[in-house]
Image (cartoon, rainbow, N blue to C red):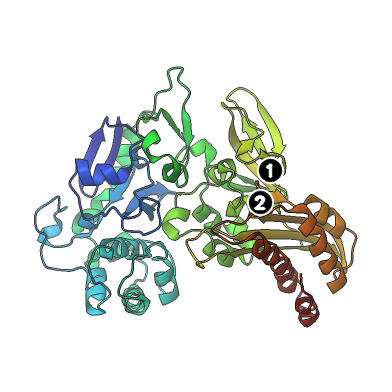
Amino acid sequence: MIKFILNNKDISTNLPAGMVLLDFIRYQQQLTGTKIGCNEGDCGACTILAGEWLNDTLQYRSYTSCLTPLGNAHGKHIVTIEGLNTADGGSPFQGGSPSAALNPVQQAMSDESATQCGFCTPGFTVSLAGFCLSQQAPTTKNAIASIDGNICRCTGYKSIERAAARVALLLQKRQEETPVDFGIKNNLLPPWFAGIGQRLKQLKLSLNGDARHSENGITTRMVGGGTDLYVQKHDEMQDAPIRFMLDNPALKGIVQEDDRCIIGPSATVTDLSESPIFKKHFPRLAQHTALVSSTPIRNIATLAGNFINASPIGDFTIFFLALDAMLVLSDGTSTRELPLRKLYKGYKTLDKQPGEYIEKIWFRLPGRNSRFHFEKVSKRTNLDIASVNTALHIITDGNSIREAHLSAGGVGPIPKFLEKTSAFLEGKPVSETTILKAIMLAQSEITPIGDTRGSEAYKRLLLSQLIKAHFITLFPELNVSELLAVEP
């Protein structure tokens, strides 16, 4: 039995846990304000909010409901555009005609003419409501970032940006209030939101274990956020026996033990970006994560899912390959440790048994003499698949490279740890000559193919230029003109 709160309504359902939340919302609950667009997590028309208790705080995050299995709504508060209706005494509109009254987010979109046909408008409104319910600084930049997963914007960017700026300006009035209290007081949320926190606590207490799946000797599919699995195998997952990993407390968390960072495999990209440990040791983290998918996807995409998906251009796979991350694999009885770079044996082929799953991920945190950088090139800056991505982690001893770890994606059938190039860099001085020789060696380690994201020659050029970008960023004293003057 799956139980959650949908807007102001308690839900209990025995429908297949593998069906997508979007279908349940539209076809079982007739909440048609949540739209069907791309069904791939790109357009943002299906955006909803999911609220849950995290670190003793009620937190809301935006999700793409087209990629969220119904089972991942278990124990949460799911909010659709209808649940943001503040008219009619805060009635959780479940059909019929809502009042003409608009909440401040909707009013900002209307006043700035930030909507045309209206199809995508509910998604924008929900995403901006999610920003209002977050603890992010109330800046225009952050407001605009919150709608980076809503790319259906036929009236153009500027009118939508102006609407987002108005929302940010309203939030600047918030002082010591919780986001929910402020939202109710300022008509951003209906009054019944005030009781959701207590209702969620009671719901959690009533859930005796995880009833979203029943194995009974059947081989189950392990699902984290589902952000790629549901793109590739949407119909197959509807009735599949699933073992849900996203909300398993034993698989969550990011902690530091001495010089090691230990990560639960169900940690999401957002969890990483908000982690004090990651913020401390990766000062460019915000720049790096902004290049990865979009806010609603980052909110549900898990680290282990990125690894196990085995995409040759998995962004965080490339990120953690350069950190020489280690995996602890478990079959439920015994465990074994495996370097991430040894996981990939061939295209979508892993050194992993069918019953094994990632129990833990760890790596040694960068020290005083460590430097790390991640680069990605794609057709769109945000919410796009990389043509080539790459990461470099260097430990220096004076002007000499003591240790180097270079990874690259989009240049072969697997996420690639450039072993020969990394070994070459060790013991060498940081110099223009060293970098150019390393680039030549890297070219011998890669086997890119031409596809919709670029020709073989283009990808080779990209990797060369991105390696230069790593060093220019990490060692600004280098002679940039000399590096860029040399043809790859």
Q: Which amino acid, by three-letter code, is at mark 1?
A: Leu
Q: Observer-nearest residue: 402 or 122?
A: 122
| Residue occupied by mark 1 | 340
Query: Who comes first in sequence, dot 1 or dot 2?
Result: 2
Where does residue 12 sit, x and y in percent of width and height?
24, 34
Q: Is residue 163 left or right of residue 453?
A: left
Q: Quadrant of the N terminus?
A: top left
Q: Is residue 250 left or right of residue 406?
A: left
Mark 2 crowdedness (10 Å alpha carbons): few <14, some 14-19, many ≥20: many
C-alpha span from label 1 to label 2: 8 Å
Q: Residue 197, can we see it?
A: no
Q: Residue at x 72, y 40 (%)?
A: 342
The reply to whether dot 1 and dot 2 touch (C-beta < 8 Å) is yes
Q: Determine the image quadrant of residue 162.
A: bottom left
Task: Assign a secondary structure to mark 1.
Answer: helix
| Residue occupied by mark 2 | 320
Q: Which mark is residue 384?
A: none
